[in-house]
Every structure is written in structure tokens, then in C-alpha cells.
Image (spheres, coloured by chain):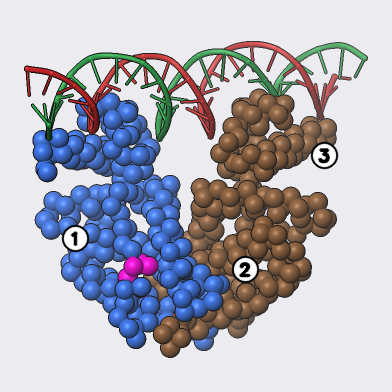
Chain colours: A brown, B blue, C green, D red
Amino acid sequence: MTGLRERKKEQTRRRIAEVALRLFAERGYDAVTVNEIAATAEVAKVTLFKYFPTKESLVLEGVAEEDLAQIVSARPAGQSPLAALRAHYLATAPDDCPDEEPRDEQAREALITRMGVIFDNPALSAAAGELLHRQRQELARVLAHDHDELTAALMAAQITATILTVQETFYRRLVAGASLADAGLRLGSDVRLAFDLLENGIDPSKGR
Amino acid sequence: MTGLRERKKEQTRRRIAEVALRLFAERGYDAVTVNEIAATAEVAKVTLFKYFPTKESLVLEGVAEEDLAQIVSARPAGQSPLAALRAHYLATAPDDCPDEEPRDEQAREALITRMGVIFDNPALSAAAGELLHRQRQELARVLAHDHDELTAALMAAQITATILTVQETFYRRLVAGASLADAGLRLGSDVRLAFDLLENGIDPSKGR
DNA sequence: CGCCAAAGATGAACTCGGTTTGCTTTTGAA
DNA sequence: TTCAAAAGCAAACCGAGTTCATCTTTGGCG
């Protein structure tokens, strides 16, 4: 059922996203209007908004789409939630980006460009954080199976905050020019450090 | 130097804020336009925006104004950052709200109303979280004195996420109808639980 | 092939948050 | 009393996002 209609839609969607990303990267998120994007992509503004509900979504689409709650609730019996998450991030970390699996060089570059745009704009970074924030609630719900409500909420908050920080660090290094290989290598040890901190707590004896 | 001018300004500002809060509480944040608020408060829209930079700020002003970085960097020698924060929140917690010190019943009620408005609207809650997020960066800077950068960033993220969660829990209880005394009592033990979790980590043995 | 209903695209007008501009009123200090 | 600065204002403007009525494209079907 992949008729001409579907193909055209997919094509239009991609054209809009590409144009938007290019313009954002060239002149900054705020300096580009959606009217401009629509005109450049040769669609009406209303059409653009049928594909992407907001201007933000032009950039944020597909970012941080992991389902933490799912990872935790699908973990093998006997494994702690934290161990499951650690394993997940260690598995995806060393050779690829945690958010997506860009197969080719081009997709990688696009992802890095996108991250550059996001980190360049405080409102966008905040919105990206919000995406994870929503997962927090579901994660808390799953964790509440084994803990009281406040503990579950606290755990979920700490976990999502930690993951966000690690991802941010990783992407900032990439945007700052580190090679993907280098950043990937450091990501592995970063994940370990982050989860150790989560598991063992903030040791007061080190805090002078 | 508290001339007529200053008094009038303060008065206008308060009138705007009160009108806004009342309308928001009556009909919800989204259903009230700033034009309406301005008209009801009998000022021009442009005047309203001279007092409050955004619609959000009509509600969020004065919320979460604590300076975490300050608390940490001003701690007595030999005390860990976490201990300083714990002490601070334990001190303010039992008998009053962490964000402000409403002296009279009226101010308390206004605060609760405001929190009700905030928690009623996802975008507003998110914005409130953003306020704390900004403190995160400064807290990380201070913590970086004693830790490497990633560790400091992770600690700051976990700490702010934790504090936000505790505050949210507290206010949700209030909005849900708990008496201030009850909520305050539970807040004390909540703070202890939260900081214990931060210090000791998420114990995997409890995570089934 | 030709027909038609449904899906999709469109431009124009609209709402709302926020800003700019150019002007009048109010205030406080000399 | 005078006058510059501060404050207020109406109206026009901007950009994101929506509504609506209209027009085009597609694909299924006889």
C-alpha cells in the first residue's frame, strides 16, 4: 500500500525537514521564520504545520525517542532497573549515538548539525529536556511497582536527569568538533561513571 | 525615596498580578488572554508587559528563587555540599514553605492558588522546572571546584531533579487539599528520604 | 478509460503573545 | 513654576499557530 500518495507525502515531509535544518544551521533558529521555511520548501504554511505541529518539532523530531519505562519493565528477571538501563546505554554507546543509529556518514552529519542547532538555542535545549521529562513520569510509574511513590519519583527524576546530562555532554563534545569515534569512546566511560554515581550516591567524603 | 511614584508603581504591579492570578484560577491559564488581564487591571497591554516580561512571569514570579549555588559555596568549612543543602531544606521545611515565607493566611492561600494554577498547566510546570534548571548550571560550576566536570554536572543534575521532585510532591499535596501543617510535617521526612537517596544511591538490592 | 469521493494542498483571514513607535500625561526636583 | 524624565497609552506591527472555504490530486471502481 505504498502508493504514489504516500511516497509524495514522505518526500514533502523530508524536504521540509531538510530545508528547515539547513536554514536553522545557516542563520540560527530564531532568525528563521516558518513562513520562510514553507516558502523555501515550496509548500503553504498550513501544509507545513500539518506535517510538523510546531516550529520546535522541525528540529526535535526523533530526538530522545527511547522509552525508558519500556526498557525497565522489559528487563530480565532478577535484574535491577538501574542495571537494565546501564546495560542498554552501554550497549548502544560505544559504536553509535544513543538516540538513533545513523547508518551512513550523511545521516551522522545531519544529526550533529541538528544537535548543534539545538544546543545553540536555550529554548530548544529546554524543550529537548522536556521530552525526557515526559518519560520521567512513566518511568516513575514502573518503578512504583517496587518502591513507594516518592522514592519512585525521586529515582525516576535522578535517572532521567543523569541520562540527559550524559547525552548533553556527548553531543556537546561532538558539536565542539570531537570525532565521533573519540566521543563514542568517552561516552562508554561516561555512562559507567554516571550509573556508578546513581547507584552508589554522592559520596560525602569526597565532597570536602 | 519612597515617593508617590514608587508607591503607585508597586500598587499597579500588585493589581496586575492579583487580577491575573484570580482570572487564571477561575478559568485556567490558557483560557485567559493578556488583553483581558490588562483590561481588567485597567492598564494598557504594553504597560502590563513593562511590569511582567511574559505571560508566564505573571504566575512564576517569585517561585523557586533559592540560590543553590550560593548555599553550597557559602557552606561552613568541612561540610559537604549535600549536607549544606540538606540542612537548608530541613531548616525551611518543617514550619514553612521552601520557596517563600508567607506570613499571613492570605499570602499562604495566594501561594497555594498559584501552585494550583501552575500544576494545572503542563507548560507552566515545565517552565517552573526550567527555573531550577538554570540554577543547575551554576551549581555545577561550584561543584566543579571539588570534582571533575562530568561528575559535577551529574551531581548538579541529580540534586536539582531531586529538589524539584520533593517540592512538586509537597505542593501537589497542598493543592490536593492537605493542610499546610500536615504537608509540612511530611515534607521534613520527604527531604530526609530524598537526600538519603542522593547520598547513598539507588540500592540495587532493593530494586528486585 | 472515465468518474467520483476522499485526501491533500492552499491562500486568506484570524487569534494571541509580544514588540515598536510616536505621542500625551504625570511626577518630582530645581 | 518650570521642565526633563518617567510612565502610560493607542495603534500598528510581527511571528507562531488555527480556521475555513476552496481547489487539486489521487486512487478505487465500474
Q: Quadrant of the N terminus of chain B?
A: top left
Task: In the rendered structure, find residue A179 and report the number of the disc placed on it.
Answer: none
Q: Secondary structure at mark 3?
A: loop
- The residue where tag 2 is placed is A71
Residue A69 in the image: x percent, y percent?
57, 65
Residue B93 placement: quadrant: bottom left
Q: Residue at x 53, y 56 (%)?
A: A129
Q: Left or right? Give the position of C16 relative to A23.
A: left
Amino acid residing under circle 3:
Thr
Residue span colored magenta:
B68-72
Q: Left or right? Give the position of B186 relative to A199.
A: left
**In this rendering, is residue A36 above or below B149?**
above
Q: Residue at x 46, y 76 (%)?
A: B145
Task: Name the chief secondary structure element in magenta.
Answer: helix
Amino acid residing under circle 1:
Glu
Amino acid residing under circle 2:
Ile
**In this rendering, is residue A162 above or below B196?**
above
Q: Secondary structure at mark 1?
A: loop
**Numbered disc 1: what chain?**
B
Distance (Cα) linking label 1 and label 2: 42 Å
**Numbered disc 2: what chain?**
A
- The residue where tag 3 is placed is A2
Residue B154 in the image: x percent, y percent?
51, 71
Residue A116 in the image: x percent, y percent?
64, 52
The image shows a total of numbered marks equal to: 3
- Mark 3 or 2 closer to N-term? 3
- The residue where tag 1 is placed is B101
Q: Left or right? Give the position of A165 relative to C7.
A: left
* Label 3 close to label 1 by CB (< 8 Å): no
- From the viewer's side, name the closer residue of B91 and C23: C23
